[in-house]
Amino acid sequence: MSTQLAAPIDVERIRADFPILQRRINGNRLVYLDSAATSQKPQPVLDSVDQYYHTSNANVHRGVHTLAGEATDAYEAARDRVAAFIDAPRDGVVFVRNTTEALNLVASSFARELLEPGDRVVLTVMEHHSNIVPWQLAAERKGLQLAYIDVSDDGRLDLRDLDELLSPPTKLVSLSHQSNVLGTITDIRAISDAAHAAGVLICVDAAQSVPHMPVSVRDLDVDFLAFSGHKMCGPMGIGVLWARPALLERMPPFLGGGSMINRVRLERTTYNVVPHKFEAGTPDVAGAVGLAAACDYLDAVGRDAVHAHEQSLTQHLLDVLDEVGGVRVFGPHDVNEQGGVVSFNIADVHAHDVGTILDRAGVAIRAGHHCAQPLMQRFDVPATARASVYLYTTHDDIDALAAGLADVRRVFRLA
Ligand code: 7TS
């Protein structure tokens, strides 16, 4: 990745595009360090959604009138835009609500038709619940085995047993590109090469990577890729499953209803072509339009530049947390292997108390188990505090976090 060569981004100009950053919270400026949960939205994305509803709103794929044609064109153009954004063939782009739905679609449809009882699916201990629970449900329904790649003490995947884990009866490995808790970036290409050499397919939860760095489906050579629009400057309610079209052809529909059919008779239904076979009902057209605008926005800034900016912020964050005193940071501590997400605890103060005290100063972080309870168990903690950055985050924001953590130390009288 050519991150070193990326020109620095003009963060003040970027911030001017995000109206919400003008908010004041408890009398202080908003310091938003919760972008891993959801990103804020720039004006061009807000405008695109607004414009769609103002000028072209209609249902898609069914009307003969002008607006229906415009809405359908906008929706299908968004599919092209998203495919280009992840460097993937467009026929594999299925619009869904979010990463969770995308992973449920794979676990449900793929497992139903293309897996047999006794087959094994390999996950990791650092998955978000949305890449664990759907597989547990599929395992129950289908009699599958699940196995987990462990996580080392420094928050990396422990790949020593990978060959063993990929051996029969394993059929699929499903894992996150970047951990939403530790920030750990996993070398997906190394795992896809090993998986394919063993005849195993690979599904990647890219919820935390697609928004923050260049991601190419072709380069990663993956079979499924899932991500959410709302974490990448796009609207809530729109997400993407990309899958190899040949696999989508073989998978049964996930939901049944309008749009996903070819012909319905009372006895039997034939299905629409891929990817429409997986898009039952009226889709979130405005969401798709907004997502395409988000792709444009991020590409105009440059994802290499976003990644380089976040590396610089993450280094500052790690340095600052080191200076606060009494802070335990989870994860690799290395910005070459870690995106802009840092989890920590301060002495034995509960993360919720840390989050509440920071909120008084206008600093928004996430506190809790981050929908990754098995990872919390792995590190033997009930919860962590988590700061996460994005293209609009400044070094001053990190300093505001440090000042807030000094307050936490004062409130809890930590020596
Ligand atoms: N996978 C990862 C790696 C995630 O970080 C999240 C959301 C999801 C899947 C699910 O995404 P959704 O859009 O379907 O909800 N992560 C977080 C988080 O870290 N804090 O809030 C949501």
Image: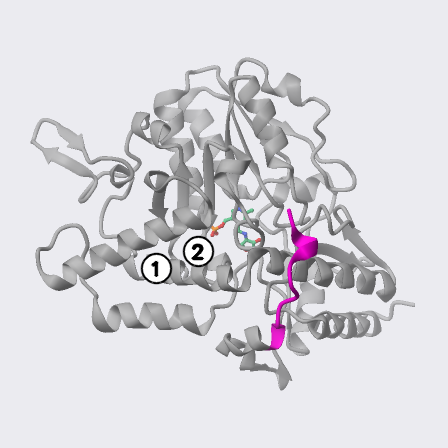
Q: Residue at x 62, y 44 (%)?
A: 373
| Color theme of the render | one colour
Residue 32 image offset from top left, x and y in percent: 61, 70
Q: Circle 1 sits in a helix, a strand or a loop, which is it? A: helix
45 over 142 or under it: above or below: below
Residue 14 image offset from top left, x and y in percent: 56, 73
Q: Residues within 10 Å of mark 2 (few under 14, many from 20)?
A: many
Question: Range of the magenta residues?
Answer: 1-12
Looking at the rendered image, the quarter that the C terminus falls into is: bottom right
Q: Residue at x 74, y 43 (%)?
A: 380
46 over 99 or under it: above or below: below
Q: Which of these two is toward me, 106 or 117?
A: 106
The answer to whether residue 7 is magenta is: yes
Q: Residue at the far bottom: name it.
A: 27
Residue type marked 1: Gly
Q: Residue at x 67, y 66 (%)?
A: 355
Residue 98's label in the rendered image is none
Residue type marked 2: Gly
* Beta carbon of the mark 2 residue lies under 8 A of ligand 1: no
60 over 48 or under it: above or below: above
Residue 406 visible somewhere in the drawing: yes
Q: Which of marks 1 and 2 precedes in the sequence? A: 2
Identify residue for label 1: 287
Q: Residue at x 55, y 82 (%)?
A: 22
Q: Residue at the far right: name it.
A: 415
Left or right: 356, with 327 as reference point:
left
**Contact, mark 2 vs mark 1 (Cβ under 8 Å):** yes
Label 2 vs label 1: CA separation? Answer: 8 Å
Identify residue for label 2: 229
Left or right: 120, with 4 as reference point:
left
Residue 341 visible somewhere in the drawing: no
